[in-house]
Image (cartoon, rainbow, N blue to C red):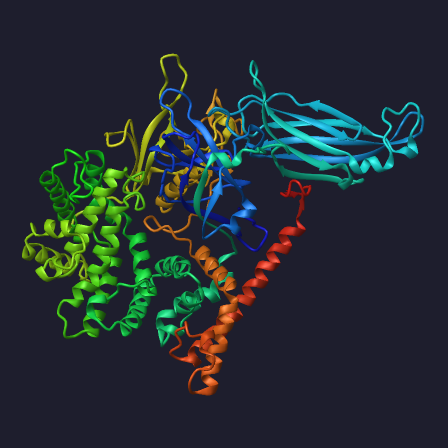
C-alpha cells in the first residue's frame, strides 16, 4: 500500500513463511492428502501429495509477499481423488489480526469443518445516509438511503468469475424489508451503483398514514444488512458474504466506507470438530510500515559503519544480534542491508575474527551458530541461488525424475534389494554430484569468494601451526552449509518445486552425507573413517581413493577462496530468474475467429523472456529483455479474468494470467526489475485491452494511441539480489523497538562496568552479553536509543495522519474507509 500524502512513499508490507504436517485425519483410513494455502478463498500454494497416510508430513516451506488486503490466512486439507473432485477434509483459518499471536511459534490447530457460510472474501463499498422528510400531511419522517456502489475481490466459483448480486435489507425486531440489485455477469469486482430507499418513522411523527410503527427505542435496534450472492441460474445460489451496519451510527450524517464481507453468524459451527484431525504450523508473519527513505538515514548510517567500530562488539549491528532472542531474526535484514550497500565482507571478517578468539581447537572452527556463521549462511542463500542452479539442478533433476535404489543400511533394506547394486547406484550419484561441485568454481559468485578469502586468512592467522585449517575454514561453509544442505533439501533452494518422496529423500540424505565427508578436509583418512557411527557408511567410503578426492577438494577450495577474477573471457551465462506455468492470450486467431487462453511454461532470464509448450521444450516465443517497454497489471474487465498482467514490447501486448495474486505480483516485480534500465521504457500505458476496435480504458479507436495511464515508476533493488534497503532498515528498527528492554539492560551493564572497574555486579542481568569495551558500547547504545525515539515519533505522526483521513466501519466490520 502506498500513501503519497506523507512526504513521499509509505509502504505497508506483509510477508509470511510456514511449514506443516497433520495427524489423525478423517476419513479413518489410509488416504492421499495434500494441503493448500489460501489468502481468504484464493489458493496461492499447494503442497505435494502425501500418499497412503493418516498423519501426513508435508515439511514444506513457503515464503511470499502478500500483495493485497486480506481477512484471513487459511489452510485446507484435501483427500486426493483420481476420478472425482478432491474432497476437502477440513481447514484452519487464522484472522489477519490474530497472526501475530502465532508468529515464530510451532502450534497444533484443530481442523474445522468447511462450511459454505464461512467461506467468504472481498469487500463492499457502501454510502449510507439518514434523511428527514416532510410528508404530504406535514409530519416528519426519516428516510434511510443505501447506495451500494461496488464490490472488490469476490471469490472465484469453480475456477471462474462469479455472477454476483446483492440483497439490501433493513432489519429490526418487527420488520425485514429486502431489496435486490441486478445480477452482474462474470466479474469478481462488480459495479452496482444502485440506490435503495427505506422509510423510518419515529413515534413523535406517527400518523395513521405512516407505513411503519417504529418506537423511538427501536431505532437503536435497526440495522442495514447487505448479503452478496452468486446467481446459480439453474442451481442454488451461493452465499458470498454479508455485512451489518447499525442505523444508530448514522444519525443525520452521511457515511461512506469499504466493509469487509463477513461469514454468517452460524457459519463454521459444528459439534464434531474434534473428529477431523489437526494440523501443525510454524508461521512467521511480519507487517512493516516503511516510511520515506530519508527517515532511515541516521539508523542506516549507524549500521553501515559497524565494520569500522573497534571493537566490533560495540557496533550497532553486533548489538542488534545481542538483544534479539533469536539471532536469525537479526541476521536476515542485517545481511540484506549490508549486501545492498556493499558492506557485508568487512563486517563478516570482523565478527569472524571475534568468533575465532573463542575457538580453542582448529577442528571445531566455524561449527557453531554464531553471528559470523549465520551471516555467511544467509549470504550464501541470497547470492548463491543461481550458482546452485547451474551446478546442481541437472543432477538433482536426474535423481528425482529417474531414481535408482540407493539404500545401503542393512536394517532399512527392502526385500529383494541388492546392497551391492545399491552401493554402485549411490556411488554413481555421489561421483556425479561431487564432480559437478569441484568443477563449478568458475561460477562461484565473486562476493562468496571474497568472504571465503577473508575466512581462510583469518583461520590461518589464528592457527599458524595447522596447515589444513585454512581449507577447513572454507569447506565448513561451502560443503557442509551450502552444497550438502541444498542436496538434502532441494525444494528449499528452488532446485525442485516440491519436497521429494520418501525414497528419493533418503537417497538425497545419503548423497548429502557423502558430500559432507568428501568436502571435510582430511575426512577420508583411516583414523577419521573409524569414527563413523554408521558402519555401512564406513564401508561405503572405503571404496573412495583418498588422495584423488583430497586433491580435487583442495584445488576447488583454492579457487573459490581466491580474489582473482574467475569470470570467463567470453559473454557470461544469462542469469536464470524465474519460471513457471501460466496462461497467455493467443497471439493469433483460432479457426472460429476467437482468441483464447493457452497454458504455457514461462521462463525469465537476464537476457530474455520466453514461453514454451512444456517445461524443457524449445521456446515458441521469445522477447529479448532489451525490447520490453513496460510491464503492468491489466484490468480484470478486459477479459473477465483475475490476476492478469501485460508485457509491452515492439509487437502487440502479451497478455498473461497468473494462477493467483501472489504469483502475479512476483512475476510483475521480476520483469520490472530486469527491465528497469531499458532506455525505451514507456511513460504511459493502457490499463485495459484493445478489443473490438477500441481501447476499453479510454475508448480511443487507434491501436497506436499513446497510453492513458502513467506507468509504474518505482522499481526496487537489482536483478539478481532482491533487496529493498528501506524495508530492511524498518525491520531492524522494529527489532530494536521490540527488544527495547534488553537495550536498557545492556546500557545498565555498561554503566555498571564503567563505574565499578572491577568484578561485575549482578552478572545474571548481563552475563549473556559480549561487552569488550563498555564505554564504546554505551556510546553506541545511546545513539541507537536516540534514533529509535525519533523514528517512533515519525511513525506516530503517520498513524495520526492516516487515522484523521479515514473513518471506520462498524465493530463487526473493522476496515478503513475513505471519507468523501
Nearer the observer, 582 or 81: 81
Q: Quadrant of residue 69?
A: top right
Tell me if 94 is positioned left or right of 558 in this view.
Answer: right
Which is nearer the eye, 632 or 380? 380
Residue projecting furthest to the top:
592
| Residue 769 placement, left or right of 606 | right
Looking at the image, residue 248 lies above or below residue 334: above
- The residue shown at (37%, 43%) is 670
Judging depth in this view, the residue of 134 and 203 nearest the camera is 203
Report which quarter residue 410 is drawn in: top left
Labels in figure, total: 0
**Taking 526 as reference, is 178 above or below it?**
above
In the displayed structure, 108 sits above or below 89; it is below
Tell me if I can see residue 615 in this picture.
Answer: yes
Q: Give the percent coordinates (x, y) of residue 636.
A: 50, 29
Compared to 567, does 396 lie above or below?
above
Q: Residue at x 45, y 75 (%)?
A: 764
Quadrant, the C terminus: top right
Residue 176 pos. (x, y %)? 75, 26
564 to the left or right of 689 = left
Is residue 701 among what the camera can see? no
Which residue occupies 23% across, 62% down? 452
Residue 645 lies, in percent from the top left, at 43, 34
The spot of residue 521 in percent (x, y) is 14, 61
Amino acid at each position: 500500500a502506498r500513501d503519497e500524502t506523507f512526504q513521499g512513499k509509505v509502504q505497508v508490507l506483509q510477508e509470511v513463511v510456514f511449514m506443516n504436517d497433520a495427524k489423525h485425519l478423517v476419513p479413518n483410513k489410509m488416504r492421499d492428502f495434500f494441503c493448500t494455502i489460501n489468502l481468504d478463498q484464493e489458493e496461492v500454494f499447494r503442497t505435494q501429495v502425501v500418499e497412503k497416510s493418516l498423519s501426513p508430513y508435508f515439511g514444506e516451506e513457503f515464503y511470499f509477499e502478500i500483495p493485497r488486503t486480506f481477512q484471513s490466512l487459511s489452510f485446507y486439507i484435501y483427500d486426493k481423488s483420481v476420478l472425482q473432485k478432491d474432497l476437502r477434509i477440513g481447514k484452519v483459518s487464522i484472522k489477519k489480526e490474530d497472526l501475530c499471536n502465532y508468529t515464530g511459534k510451532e502450534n497444533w490447530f484443530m481442523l474445522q469443518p468447511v462450511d459454505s457460510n464461512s467461506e467468504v472474501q472481498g469487500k463492499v463499498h457502501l454510502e449510507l445516509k439518514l434523511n428527514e422528510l416532510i410528508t404530504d400531511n406535514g409530519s416528519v419522517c426519516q428516510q434511510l438511503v443505501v447506495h451500494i456502489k461496488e464490490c472488490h475481490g469476490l471469490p472465484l466459483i469453480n475456477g471462474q468469475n462469479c455472477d454476483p448480486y446483492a440483497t439490501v435489507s433493513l432489519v429490526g425486531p418487527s420488520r425485514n424489508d429486502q431489496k435486490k440489485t441486478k445480477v452482474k455477469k462474470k466479474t469478481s469486482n462488480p459495479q452496482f451503483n444502485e440506490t435503495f430507499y427505506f422509510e423510518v418513522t419515529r413515534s413523535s411523527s406517527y400518523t395513521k398514514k405512516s407505513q411503519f410503527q417504529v418506537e423511538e427505542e427501536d431505532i437503536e435496534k435497526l440495522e442495514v444488512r447487505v448479503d452478496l450472492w452468486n446467481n446459480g441460474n439453474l442451481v442454488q445460489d451461493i452465499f458470498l458474504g454479508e455485512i451489518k451496519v447499525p442505523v444508530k451510527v448514522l444519525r443525520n450524517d452521511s457515511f461512506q466506507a469499504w466493509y469487509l464481507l463477513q461469514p454468517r453468524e452460524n457459519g463454521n459451527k459444528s459439534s464434531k470438530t474434534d473428529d477431523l484431525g489437526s494440523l501443525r504450523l510454524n508461521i512467521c508473519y511480519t507487517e512493516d510500515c516503511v516510511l520515506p527513505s530519508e527517515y532511515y538515514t541516521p539508523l542506516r548510517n549507524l549500521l553501515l559503519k559497524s565494520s569500522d567500530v573497534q571493537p566490533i562488539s560495540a557496533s550497532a549491528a553486533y548489538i542488534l544480534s545481542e538483544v534479539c532472542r533469536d539471532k536469525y531474526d537479526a541476521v536476515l535484514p542485517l545481511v540484506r542491508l549490508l549486501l545492498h550497500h556493499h558492506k557485508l565482507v568487512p563486517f563478516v571478517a570482523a565478527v569472524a575474527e571475534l568468533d575465532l578468539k573463542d575457538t580453542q581447537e582448529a577442528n571445531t572452527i566455524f561449527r557453531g551458530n554464531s553471528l559470523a556463521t549465520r551471516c555467511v549462511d544467509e549470504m550464501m542463500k541470497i547470492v548463491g541461488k543461481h550458482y546452485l542452479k547451474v551446478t546442481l539442478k541437472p543432477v538433482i533433476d536426474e535423481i528425482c525424475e529417474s531414481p535408482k535404489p540407493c539404500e545401503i543400511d542393512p536394517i532399512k533394506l527392502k526385500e529383494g534389494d541388492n546392497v551391492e547394486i545399491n552401493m554402485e547406484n549411490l556411488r554413481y550419484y555421489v561421483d556425479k554430484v561431487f564432480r559437478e561441485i569441484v568443477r563449478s568454481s568458475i561460477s562461484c559468485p565473486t562476493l562468496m569468494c571474497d568472504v571465503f578469502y577473508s575466512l581462510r586468512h583469518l583461520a590461518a592467522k589464528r592457527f599458524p601451526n595447522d596447515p589444513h585449517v585454512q581449507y577447513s575454514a572454507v569447506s565448513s561453509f561451502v560443503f557442509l552449509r551450502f552444497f550438502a544442505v541444498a542436496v538434502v533439501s532441494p525444494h528449499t533452494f528452488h532446485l525442485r518445486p516440491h519436497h521429494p518422496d520418501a525414497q528419493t529423500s533418503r537417497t538425497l540424505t545419503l548423497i548429502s552425507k557423502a558430500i559432507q565427508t568428501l568436502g571435510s578436509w582430511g575426512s577420508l583418512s583411516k583414523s577419521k573413517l573409524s569414527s563413523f557411527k554408521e558402519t555401512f557408511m564406513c564401508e561405503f567410503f572405503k571404496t573412495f581413493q583418498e588422495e584423488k578426492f583430497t586433491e580435487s577438494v583442495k584445488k576447488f577450495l583454492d579457487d573459490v577462496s581466491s580474489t582473482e577474477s574467475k569470470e570467463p573471457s567470453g559473454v557470461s551465462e544469462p542469469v536464470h530468474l524465474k519460471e513457471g506455468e501460466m496462461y497467455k492470450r493467443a497471439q493469433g486467431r483460432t479457426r472460429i475467429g476467437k482468441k483464447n487462453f493457452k497454458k504455457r511454461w514461462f521462463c525469465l532470464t537476464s537476457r530474455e523472456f520466453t514461453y514454451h509448450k512444456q517445461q524443457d521444450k524449445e521456446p515458441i516465443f521469445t522477447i529479448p529483455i532489451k525490447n520490453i517497454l513496460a510491464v503492468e497489471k491489466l484490468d480484470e474487465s478486459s477479459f473477465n479474468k483475475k490476476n492478469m498482467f501485460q508485457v509491452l514490447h515492439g509487437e502487440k501486448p502479451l497478455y498473461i494470467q497468473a494462477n493467483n495474486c501472489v504469483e502475479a505480483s512476483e512475476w510483475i516485480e521480476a520483469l520490472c526489475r530486469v527491465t528497469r534500465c531499458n532506455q525505451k521504457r514507456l511513460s504511459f500505458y493502457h490499463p485495459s485491452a484493445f478489443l473490438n476496435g477500441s481501447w476499453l480504458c479510454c475508448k480511443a479507436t487507434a491501436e497506436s494511441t499513446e497510453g492513458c495511464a502513467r506507468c509504474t515508476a518505482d522499481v526496487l533493488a537489482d536483478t539478481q539480489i532482491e533487496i529493498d534497503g528501506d524495508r530492511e532498515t524498518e525491520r531492524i528498527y522494529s527489532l530494536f523497538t521490540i527488544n527495547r528492554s534488553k537495550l536498557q539492560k545492556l546500557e545498565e551493564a555498561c554503566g555498571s562496568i564503567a563505574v565499578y572497574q572491577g568484578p561485575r555486579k549482578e552478572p545474571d542481568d548481563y552475563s549473556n552479553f559480549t561487552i569488550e569495551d563498555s564505554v564504546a558500547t554505551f556510546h553506541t547504545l545511546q545513539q541507537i536509543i536516540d534514533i529509535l525515539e525519533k523514528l517512533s515519533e515519525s511513525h506516530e505522526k503517520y498513524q495520526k495522519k492516516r487515522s484523521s483521513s479515514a473513518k471506520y466501519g462498524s465493530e463487526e466490520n473493522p476496515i478503513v474507509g475513505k471519507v468523501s
